[in-house]
């Protein structure tokens, strides 16, 4: 088992933290994981991405050339990274994103940003909702281990809200697990 995941969006959406949490959850689940990140020079609003490789074997190269799973929370990040996916990959985009029909992947629109804004009333939870969605796509990682990693990494006092955001994300895409 090896999965290469790219989480992309803009600075300030917390996707780099989500990548760190995902990698920690994988390690707690006795898997190997590497995580890398990049972001534009702007603190907020610039492009950002986190890459996580998870495997039950050694990971010999820590960078992703083509992802198995792509998460995009902005149109700009989708436009940039959708060209770098495997043909049989899963692409998760925020429901606000326009998707190119020529992409050969399983594409799913999920209201991540709307859920963070309207349901949880905290835009900063979009990254943790994303982790809930991802937990359905990577059954090798125990969701309880992701919750531990969330509690270890989010600001003190926000653990309960973030666990709620994770659970909210888990309601999306449960049916995709069987197809992947």
Image (spheres, rainbow, N blue to C red):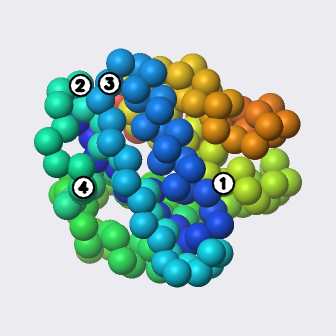
Q: CA distance from mark 2 to mark 3?
A: 5 Å
Q: Are marks 3 and 4 in contact (CB under 8 Å)?
A: no
Mark carried by residue 114 = none
Q: CA distance from mark 3 to mark 1?
A: 25 Å
Mark carried by residue 126 = 1
Q: Residues within 10 Å of mark 3 (few under 14, many from 20)?
A: some
Mark carried by residue 56 = 2
Q: Is residue 64 visible?
A: yes
Q: Identify the residue shown where x is 24% and y is 49%.
A: 62
Q: Which residue is mark 4?
A: 63
State left or right for residue 33 relative to residue 86.
Answer: right
Secondary structure of residue under mark 3:
loop
Q: Nearer the viewer, mark 3 or mark 1?
A: 3
State left or right for residue 87 relative to residue 122.
Answer: left
Q: Residues within 10 Å of mark 2 (few under 14, many from 20)?
A: some
Q: Identify the residue shown where x is 35% and y is 18%.
A: 30
Q: Residues within 10 Å of mark 1 (few under 14, many from 20)?
A: many
* Image position, residue 129 (x, y; %): 63, 45
Secondary structure of residue under mark 2:
loop
Q: Which residue is mark 3?
A: 31
Q: CA distance from mark 4 to mark 2?
A: 17 Å
Q: Quadrant of residue 7?
A: bottom left
* Image position, residue 39 (x, y; %): 48, 71
Q: Are marks 2 and 3 in contact (CB under 8 Å)?
A: yes
């Amino acid at each position: 088992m090896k999965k290469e995941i790219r989480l992309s969006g803009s600075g300030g959406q917390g996707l780099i933290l989500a990548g760190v949490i995902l990698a920690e959850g994988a390690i707690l689940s006795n898997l190997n994981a590497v995580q890398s990140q990049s972001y534009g020079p702007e603190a907020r609003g610039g492009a950002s991405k986190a890459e996580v490789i998870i495997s039950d074997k050694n990971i010999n190269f820590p960078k992703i050339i083509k992802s198995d799973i792509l998460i995009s929370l902005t149109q700009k990040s989708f436009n940039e990274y959708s060209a770098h996916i495997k043909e049989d990959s899963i692409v998760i985009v925020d429901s606000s994103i326009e998707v190119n029909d020529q992409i050969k992947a399983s594409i799913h629109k999920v209201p991540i940003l709307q859920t963070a804004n309207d349901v949880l009333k905290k835009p900063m939870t979009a990254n943790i909702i994303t982790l809930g969605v991802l937990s359905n796509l990577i059954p090798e990682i125990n969701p309880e281990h992701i919750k531990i990693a969330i509690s270890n990494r989010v600001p003190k006092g926000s653990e309960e809200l973030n666990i709620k955001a994770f659970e909210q994300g888990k309601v999306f895409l449960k049916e995709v697990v069987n197809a992947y």
